[in-house]
Amino acid sequence: MTLPEPPSGRFDGDQHLFPVRVYFEDTDLSGVVYHANYLRWFERARSDMLRLLGIDQRAAHEAGEGAYAVSALDLKYLRPAKLDDAVLLRSHVSELSPASCRIVQRAFRDDTLLCEAKVRVAFVAPNGRPRRQPREWVAAFQTILSQAEGPEAP
């Protein structure tokens, strides 16, 4: 028996699209998505975006090269998501530097913006100090940055 692959989203131009469904476990007492779950969804979408770009975070960590760490995060909650909603996470890289990148992530229900995150991830050595990202990772990011229309492309 062949098992299905976990959802991985896909690229549409410079944006990574990652769908999620709101389950009961995602909601709080009031029946809306608990705020921390947006962080989990955004993390999954970012990780999957990197995987689709060919960036192997696990191999880099296991080889002692380092890993990404969130160094800055700005979240804005606009509308609630509720049980059974289909939510689409749209992620794009808006800025790239030798040791970090900024990723803008937005959660939508249909055309309604629910939550927006502006995330800076820094590449850090095993001792926690910032270091340059692997060259091939920067090159992978540049393939989607060259498609971007601007720093805040939707």
Image (cartoon, rainbow, N blue to C red):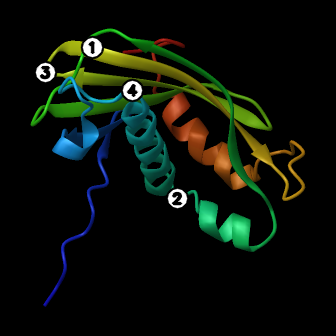
Work out whether mark 2 precedes mark 3 in sequence or the reverse, and give the earlier one.
Answer: 2
Q: For this view, does 106 lie left or right of residue 72?
A: left
From the image, tell me which residue sits under label 1: 113
Instruction: Tell me which residue sits at (47%, 42%) in the image.
Output: 43
Q: Residue type at mark 2?
A: Gly
Q: Quadrant of the N terminus?
A: bottom left
Work out whether mark 3 precedes mark 4 in sequence or the reverse, and give the earlier one.
Answer: 4
Question: Do labels 2 and 3 touch, CB within 8 Å?
Answer: no
Label 3 or label 4, whichever lies nearer to me, is 4
Q: Quadrant of the C terminus?
A: top left
Work out whether mark 4 precedes mark 2 in sequence or the reverse, and give the earlier one.
Answer: 4
Question: Measured from the top left, where is residue 81 in percent x and y?
Answer: 21, 24
From the image, tell me which residue sits under label 2: 54
Question: Do labels 1 and 2 touch, CB within 8 Å?
Answer: no
Instruction: Tell me which residue sits at (41%, 17%) in the image.
Output: 116
From the image, tell me which residue sits under label 3: 110
Q: Secondary structure at mark 2?
A: loop
Work out whether mark 1 precedes mark 2 in sequence or the reverse, and give the earlier one.
Answer: 2
Work out whether mark 4 precedes mark 1 in sequence or the reverse, and give the earlier one.
Answer: 4
Q: CA distance from mark 1 to mark 2?
A: 29 Å
